[in-house]
Amino acid sequence: MSSGGRTVMGRHGIRRLFAALAVLAALGSACGFDSREQKVYDDGGLLTEAEETRLQEFLVETADRVEQDLVIVTTRDNRGKEARDYADDFYDRHGFGYEKENGSGVLFLIDMDASEIYISTAGTAIGKYTDAEIDDTLDAVMPDMRAGDYAGACFTFVSEAERCLTGGETGDNGYYDEKADRFVEYPAEYPSAEKEPGWKKAVSPERLAIVFSISAAVSAFVVLIISRNRKTRMSVDGGTYMKDGGLQFRERSDRFTHTTVVTRQIPKDNGGGGGRGHSSSHIGSSGRSHGGGGRSF
């Protein structure tokens, strides 16, 4: 409807507008990933401005493909923390995450203070980036680190992360509980208060009654057999096994001649096979669950 050249929006139109804005707001809050958000934190001053720009673009493009937040951090002052704690705390403090704030993602830390690199995983990345794959990534990154090519190490990390998070393995020993924000290993964990201690089950009144009843029945049967045998007349006396009124003994002896030694080679476990599909986790200082691994350089 128009009045004096002005278009007046009806009540239904206003409702539709508010509904559309609400949907957009909900979608914006549901996704924690922001391509404009800083993904490279070169606090250690290891990268040039051009390298930071290229890494920022590479991280954002890769994050969209793997649907995991990807972050790189360098430092020369770890504030007395271990590399694992520094990486976990940095991730949690900045609220990184692809699907939501404090969600799923991977952080790569270069700690020049402790001469250590560390990969921290969070959310669904814990199960998707297995321990063995993290070791493989550290193997790939290490040559660049030892050569002092820190930008090359960062680019190698991003490429390896994409490979592992898309076409790689998935941890077969547990799952990520989004509600509890932790990685739960199989068999499923339950609160200890809900599980009755084993010794209480073993000495329950019902089981004790069954054990005593069986013991009493067996004892009565044995006593009955013994008492019946005592009433039986003995048919064997001292001369039954004597020949011609005397005793004869046969002498038998063993003589040691030689020793035979059998050896068998036990194959060495090279770490292959079903052990690769394992993901381990721990709880950070913020109370959130993280996986990962690191190595000195």
Image (spheres, grey):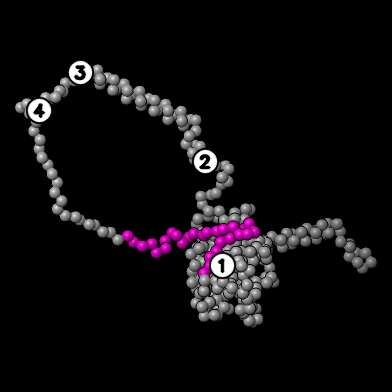
Say which of marks 2 and 1 sits in front: 2
- Whichever of callouts 3 and 1 sits on the residue coming sooner in the sequence is 1
Measured as percent of width and height from the top left, residue 98 is found at 64, 64
Q: Which residues are magenta?
A: 266-295
Residue annotated with mark 4: 242
Which residue lies at the image location 65% right of the left edge and 71% below the top edge?
A: 39
Residue 279 inside the magenta-drawn segment: yes
Numbered mark located on residue 119 in the image = 1
- Whichever of callouts 3 and 2 sits on the residue coming sooner in the sequence is 2
- The quarter of the picture where the N terminus appears is bottom right
**Figure check: 187 above or below 296:** above
**Figure check: 125 above or below 72:** above
The Cα atoms of the two marked residues, 1 and 4, are separated by 87 Å
Q: 271 or 168: nearer the eye?
A: 271
Say which of marks 1 and 4 sits in front: 4
Residue annotated with mark 3: 233
> How crowded is the residue under tag 1: few (<14 C-alpha within 10 Å), some, or many (20+)?
many
Q: 201 or 181: nearer the eye?
A: 201
Q: Residue 19 falls in which quadrant of the image?
A: bottom right
- Whichever of callouts 4 and 3 sits on the residue coming sooner in the sequence is 3
Numbered mark located on residue 197 in the image = 2
Say which of marks 3 and 1 sits in front: 3
Say which of marks 4 and 2 sits in front: 4
Which residue lies at the image location 67% right of the left edge and 64% below the top edge?
A: 93
